[in-house]
Image: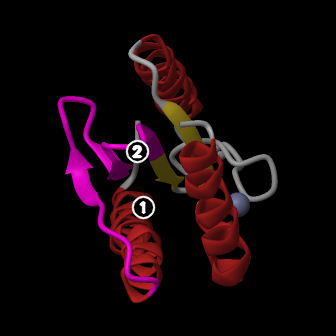
Amino acid sequence: MVDRVSKEKRSKIMSAIKSKNTKPELALANALSEEGLNFSLQYGKEKIDIAFPEQKIAIFVDGCFWHGCPMHSHTPKSNKSYWVPKLEKNKERDLAKNNRLWQEGWKILRFWEHEINNLEIIVKKILNELNEMKKGR
Ligand SMILES: [Zn+2]
């Protein structure tokens, strides 16, 4: 059972996380378009965060909390029976998505939300991947 205070507190935390969650991938998308790259957001049935359909490169930015980042994720102490399976399911869903995309020939790059702080490094990595794909042809 959850008392009222912790319920309120939790929904506050949740909305903070949610609003945070949408930002990192958009920050990355902005940086990529500044490089003059063309990509699609929320692409295809797998809803790839940032997709380069021609090169078949799929980029995901995973929220530290929801996707279980080893540095920042911790299971909330209250209501464990609710959170543990929920977060486990998220991880399973990520893996299943990876597998489906792999099978369709996509190269998958996943970044943690906290890595977006080093936007330059990530942009460089993505540019490298795109160059590699070009060379391969
Ligand atoms: Zn993290």
Q: Residues within 10 Å of mark 1 (few under 14, many from 20)?
A: some
Q: Quadrant of ligand 1?
A: bottom right
Seen in the picture, residue 6 relative to 58 is either above or below; the reply is below
The residue drawn where x is 73% and y is 75% is: 121
Of residue 111 and residue 86, the one placed in the foreground of this image is 111
Residue 109 shown in magenta:
no
Q: Compare residues 112 and 103 and report the one nearer the observer.
A: 103
State the count of labels.
2
Q: x, y percentage for residue 26?
A: 36, 75
Q: Farthest residue toward the right?
A: 71
Instruction: Give, as a three-letter code, the residue at label 2.
Output: Val
The residue stretch that appears in magenta: 35-58
Element under label 1? helix
Q: Residue at x 42, y 43 (%)?
A: 55
The residue pinned by badge 1 equals 10
**Circles 1 and 2: CB atoms closer than 8 Å:** yes
Quick check: 123 left or right of 27?
A: right
User: What is the quadrant of residue 48 in the picture?
Assistant: top left
Q: Secondary structure at mark 2?
A: loop
- Residue placed under numbered mark 2 in the picture: 2
Amino acid on which disc 1 is placed: Arg
10 Å crowding of disc 2: few (<14), some (14-19), many (20+): few
Q: Is residue 64 visible?
A: no
Identified at 36% across, 50% down, the residue is 52
- The percent coordinates of residue 30 (x first, y second) are 38, 83
Q: CA distance from mark 1 to mark 2?
A: 10 Å
Please indicate whether residue 129 sits to the left or right of residue 108 in the image.
Answer: right
**First reached walking from the N terminus: tag 1 or tag 2:** 2
Q: Residue at x 42, y 67 (%)?
A: 25
Q: Looking at the image, is 81 positioned above or below residue 123?
A: above
Up the image or down, 26 lies above or below 55; here it is: below
- The quadrant of the rendering that contains the N terminus is top left
